[in-house]
């Protein structure tokens, strides 16, 4: 086994300083992602647009739940500045959920994608979107901007939605992924599962089948770690062997790329997955 490369703290601090300078949020920091040092050390980040306050109340998430701030119209240009400074070739853009906005923030997502595409040759952009409360027209706006991957997370099994994903609906999330394939068939779709809320293996497999049923291409699966005692408790910690078993099941169902492991998060190895899936 090869040892993991040592991440230089100076490189991590460099990325943090840049993000503060251009006043950008990252889901890496807001969600206390366990891979933050690895990703920042490799000069990558998942930009979180539309502020740092969410209008939903998911019990696993560490993002603030307060009244959201007005949309920052200069944010797309600041993301462009950061991407140029970091020399990124693959960018992931996500957001808090903004149920207060008529389009759920779709136009802002689209502007961020367009600004990057129009100013950086060859840039690849993955969008990790909320459910827009099931508005198909919002999804059409985002896809119309030309993202390279459309990501929307189901997060957990249907039975646990009332306790874990307050305000979300499992069927609505599946519909977002299904619509995406119909609106933009050439754009790969992606989703994620977090394990440890009390789901059974049988329930997980059913979700995998549902995702493949709507044509989902890429999948990430990770372990839930409670951010604090106020959050949903961890019911089970999965072993590396269990993650590997679920990964093998996912591949057997036809997913084109799967990342499965305790510290895997939705944007983990995002560029690698995109590139591997395009090798004929």
Image (tube, helix red, strand yellow):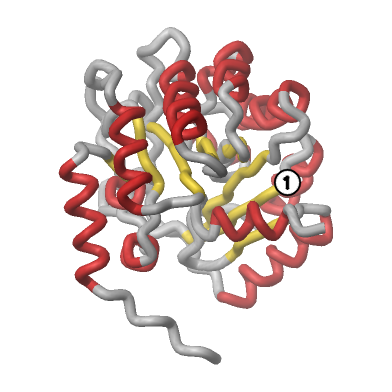
Task: Depth check: give the residue in front, 153 or 195.
Answer: 153
Q: In screen coordinates, is 136 left or right of 227? A: right
Looking at the picture, does residue 166 appear above or below residue 13?
above
Q: Identify the residue at image location x=40%, y=81%.
A: 5
Percent from the top left, x then y, of residue 134? 58, 17
Residue lying farthest top?
Answer: 102
Looking at the picture, does residue 273 appear above or below residue 67?
below
Task: Depth check: give the residue in front, 89 or 228.
Answer: 89
Residue lying farthest bottom?
Answer: 1
User: Can residue 124 be seen?
Assistant: no
Q: In screen coordinates, is 37 left or right of 241? A: left
Percent from the top left, x then y, of residue 66? 23, 26
Looking at the picture, does residue 19 appear above or below residue 201?
above
Which image quadrant: the N terminus? bottom right
Task: Depth check: give the residue in front, 17 or 246.
Answer: 17
Percent from the top left, x then y, of residue 95? 40, 33
Q: Identify the residue at image location x=40%, y=27%.
A: 97
Q: Quadrant of residue 238?
A: bottom right
Dot 1 alpha-carbon crowd within 10 angstroms: few under 14, some 14 to 19, many 20 or more: many
Secondary-structure class at tag 1: loop
Which image quadrant: the C terminus? bottom right
Q: Quadrant of residue 22?
A: top left
Q: In screen coordinates, is 195 left or right of 177? A: left
Q: Identify the residue at image location x=22%, y=20%.
A: 69
Q: Which residue is mark 1?
A: 217
Percent from the top left, x then y, of residue 52? 27, 33
User: Can residue 28 be seen?
Assistant: yes
Q: Identify the residue at image location x=70%, y=45%.
A: 207
């Amino acid at each position: 086994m090869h040892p993991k490369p040592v991440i230089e703290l100076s490189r991590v601090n460099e990325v943090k300083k840049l993000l503060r300078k251009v006043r950008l949020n990252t889901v890496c920091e807001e969600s206390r992602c366990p891979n933050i040092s690895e990703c920042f050390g490799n000069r990558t980040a998942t930009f979180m647009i539309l502020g740092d306050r969410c209008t939903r109340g998911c019990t696993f998430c560490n993002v603030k739940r307060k009244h959201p701030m007005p949309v920052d119209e200069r944010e797309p240009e600041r993301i462009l500045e950061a991407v140029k400074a970091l020399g990124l070739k693959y960018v992931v853009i996500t957001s808090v959920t903004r149920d207060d906005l008529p389009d759920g923030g779709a136009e802002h997502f689209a502007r961020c994608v367009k600004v990057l595409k129009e100013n950086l040759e060859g840039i690849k952009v993955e969008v990790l979107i909320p459910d827009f409360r099931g508005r198909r027209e919002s999804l059409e706006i985002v896809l119309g901007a030309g993202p390279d991957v459309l990501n929307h997370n189901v997060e957990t099994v249907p039975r646990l939605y009332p306790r874990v994903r307050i305000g979300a609906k499992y069927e609505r999330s599946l519909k977002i992924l299904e619509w995406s394939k119909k609106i933009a068939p050439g754009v790969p779709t992606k989703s994620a599962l977090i394990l440890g809320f009390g789901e059974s293996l049988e329930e997980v497999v059913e979700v995998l089948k549902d995702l493949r049923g709507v044509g989902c291409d890429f999948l990430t699966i990770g372990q839930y770690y409670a951010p604090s005692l106020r959050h949903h408790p961890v019911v089970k910690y999965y072993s590396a062997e269990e993650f590997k078993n679920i990964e093998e099941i996912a591949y057997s169902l036809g997913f084109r790329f799967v990342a499965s492991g305790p510290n895997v998060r939705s944007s983990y190895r995002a560029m690698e997955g995109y590139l591997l899936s395009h090798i004929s």
